[in-house]
Amino acid sequence: MQSKNYLFLIIFLAFLKIGFAQDERVLSKAAYAEKIYLQFDRENYAAGSTIWFKALVINAVDHKPSKRSGVLHVDLIGPEKQIINQKLVKIVDGSGHNHFEIPKKMPAGLYKIRAYTRWNRNFDDDFIFSKYFRIFPNLPKEENVIQNINIVDREGKFFLEAFFYPKELDSLQKRKILVGLDFNAAKQDSIEIKENDGKYKLSYKLEDKPDFVGIRMLTENGFTSGKTISLDESKIDLQILPESGILLSGSTNFLGIKALDFKGEGIYTEGVILNEKEDTVTRFKTNKLGMGVAVLNPKSSEKYIAKITNIDGNTSVYQLPEVSKKGSIISARRTGDRISLIASTTQNVDSLIIRASFRGVQLFDIVGPVKDGKFYTALPSKGFPNGIVCFTLIDKDEQPVAERLYYNDLGKEPLSIEVTTNKDEYTSREKTMLNIQVRDSTGKPVDAELSILALAQDPLGSNQKKRNSILPFFYLSSELRGKIENPGLYFNRDDNYRLRDLDALLLTQGWRNYKYDTTRIHFNYPEEPVLAIDGKVNSTIFNKPKENVELSFMALGDEPVVQTFQTDSLGRFIFNIDFLEEETREIVIQSKKGGNKRNFDIQIRDPLKLPVVFEKRLTIEKPDSVYTEIVNYEQRQQQKQFSYELAEGVTQLDEVVLEAYKMTEERQKTADLAGKPDVVIDGKKIQEKEKDWSFGLYSVLMFNFPDDIRIQRDIQEPGGDLQAKVLGGGGTTILMMDGKVVNNLNYPLIPNIPPSEVKSVEIIRFAKHFNRLYQQAYPFVSPMEIPPTGDVISIYTHGKKGIFGAQKPKGILRTTIKGYSPEKEFYQPNYANKERLESEEPDLRSVVFWEPQVKLENGETSQISFYNPDNVEVVLVVVEVITPNGKIGYHEISYPVKQRNVDAAN
């Protein structure tokens, strides 16, 4: 085992050096990146539901499954930038899948999921996958706490005004509230407001008029409410973007036009471009996504403006960039089956070079003569790959001076996906059978991996053509920075204007937003082909690395795993834990030298924390009509389910009923402060689970109760203390002991409390008054930095003395480590059973079927079957495909479903 781990260390250290034999054709560091794609079962979720996702990790340059990464890190992030849950997904042949459970108590609002590999941290945020989505209550809920938000002009000075009704949330509210303000996500402030004549009114003087403001209210008893609103819904942000970054006099210039509304989403507009004499020199209008193209022949002596009429009838004026007398530009146009390129320059040269590249790799250079400052050429489009091609104009010093992105569409998909059903029409609870085969462009069956998703067409399918599915993601979104609105529309071959709109998109996104820009090729993060832990051993006195220290590693459990290792000259070690197919595992690492136990400092290297970014503008209220339709639909279905359960005598409880729960004085204090517990772990059970190797309370809890509590090191500080986190809760955990909140400075004393001192450990998810509790645990925190929701671990001890009895072991590290997150099977009812078929319990699935990983091999046809629910009229089936050689495909079909005649069936 030792030699095996030593070889593993050699490979790992080689990765740390990241020595690549760089191909001279590679122009961009990003050519070595991985693209990460998560396919979700829907766009938005009800509290209490499950987020299902499939993950693909492929090479950026050729779309083949990546061999660099076998571990995918996936985070669920709340609106206050708190990480609520984390998953480690095992990636095999570039593919994996998992899920997030959304607790019923999860507050409604905007959330984010991000996914990354350790290797992709070499490329900043460019190749970190992220998706925003909304969580809505599973049953309708009215909340009208913040009202009448306005900008008021008082003699030329602007004030933000709003009224607050905190008693809607907190019936015990008495005197004052705290209000936090976030302007344009750039400036923050807080203000205390006292009640006046029964009202809480905000009147805040503004230095300037912001586009939007986030308002968050905090009551005296810790209740919170917030919203983000636009302060000028009629305002249009018009961006005018020259094709090559400059307006060049004496040449025909194409301008990308981009119009955005108050939420940063595209909006139709039309306008004119005027010269200094206010003569109209050209007109423009955008498509429904706010993008268009204008043509201008500017003069160097002129200045130009664009003028549009806003939706409120007022006109707005925007300055165009200054006209340059000197420079170079390049233009690309589709001409039949050819790509026409026009380069213009003011340089005194007799030839120009146009370099064609694809995903950061050089294809070829075109050298051509210059006549009257211009170089024309046309190339067959079939000579280029399908996707975004970059044309770069190179000057005589081999420096790029202008660039143009062009989408090369070859006119057909690389894969043909055939999906057939065994019937044209089905009834509810009847089995649907699908046959699926994938062929290449020549009609030959190919090996592939599929995901199959079946949805209720109404309403979940209405967004399907717009969403960022596998084709638009890998060919478009993954290669451009910035938001692309409704990316699926560009791949709808039924739209006659999609190529025109694609060209407008690339003009407005601009080559400055291309992810394959020229960057120095250097890597700071190693690959992660398998799950491993690594660290170093230091002497305790001089803190120097210790060479040739013998380490024994034991992963505890029903089937313990033992490994040994000897540190290298820098005191480093590594252990392969790719076998860890569970959320957490207790481990012990012990040091020896010369056969004797030694008091060395053993440290596990913690990964650097990835900063959390949350786009506040996206939280602006006014979700679209489709979102509202989905929410209403899901809530109606939940109400039907609730009505059925009520009629059948099924009782739904917000809290777990705890039998034989003795309400002591300390427990009553905790209940008053935080609420009643959801889980109670009796101290006797904790003592029964204690082993010889146990080192304290945390070791017993995490090894035996992994569904409720996770133990992890403080990721903000390498070598930090062990921390406890409640699973399935609000995202942030604080500790209480014997009815009192524990100050965070005393948290390091808790892990080693002897289990014999513990009466019980109790878990309170989504604790009430959490703001107030958090302030007691972290007394120096800013009130506006307090997480809106959180959980409590409450510990009760014999004699209230356990917190001070901890002893840190020497020469041994006992902790828990995170393994792969367990997968969960999608629930699928089976109506082959007659009793189940005739059951009156409603089947109200809107996600009808989900199978994320189906393998097609040796030209086989895949056969998939599932039962239809009661509540749909049309089922939409979505199939996404990737092949081992990097071909990507998408296909959808739909079929009608009639409601089953129950009387006839009986």
Image: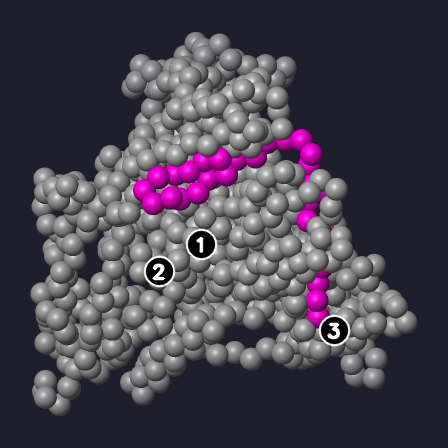
In the figure, 858 relative to 867: above or below? Answer: above
Q: Type of residue at label 3?
A: Asn
| Residue 430, percent from left and from top | 14, 73
Q: Is residue 24 left or right of residue 736?
A: left
Q: Which residue is mark 3?
A: 150
- Relative to residue 215, is residue 842 depicted above or below? below
Image coordinates for residue 832, horizontal then vertical, percent: 10, 70
Quick check: can you spot residue 526? no
Q: Please state which of residues 482 and 441 is positioned toward the viewer in this rendering.
A: 441
Asked whether 787 falls inside the magenta stretch, the response is no
Instruction: Report which residue position mark 1 lands on.
Output: 501
Q: Which residues are magenta?
A: 314-342
Closer mark to the observer between disc 2 and disc 3: 2
Query: Where is the C terminus found, in terms of image quarters?
Result: bottom left
**Disc 1, SS:** helix
N-terminal of the pair, mark 3 or mark 1, is 3
* Image vertical order of residue 86 relative to residue 315, above or below: above
| Tag 1 near tag 2, CB within 8 Å | yes
CB-based contact (under 8 Å), mark 2 and mark 3: no
- The residue carrying mark 2 is 495
Instruction: Work out how far the residue at label 2 is from the one at label 3, CA to CA, in angstroms.
Output: 41 Å
**CA–CA distance in space, label 1 to label 2:** 10 Å
- Secondary structure that dominates the magenta span: strand
Query: Label 1 sits on what residue type?
Result: Asp
For mark 2, give the secondary structure: loop
Mark 3 crowdedness (10 Å alpha carbons): few <14, some 14-19, many ≥20: some
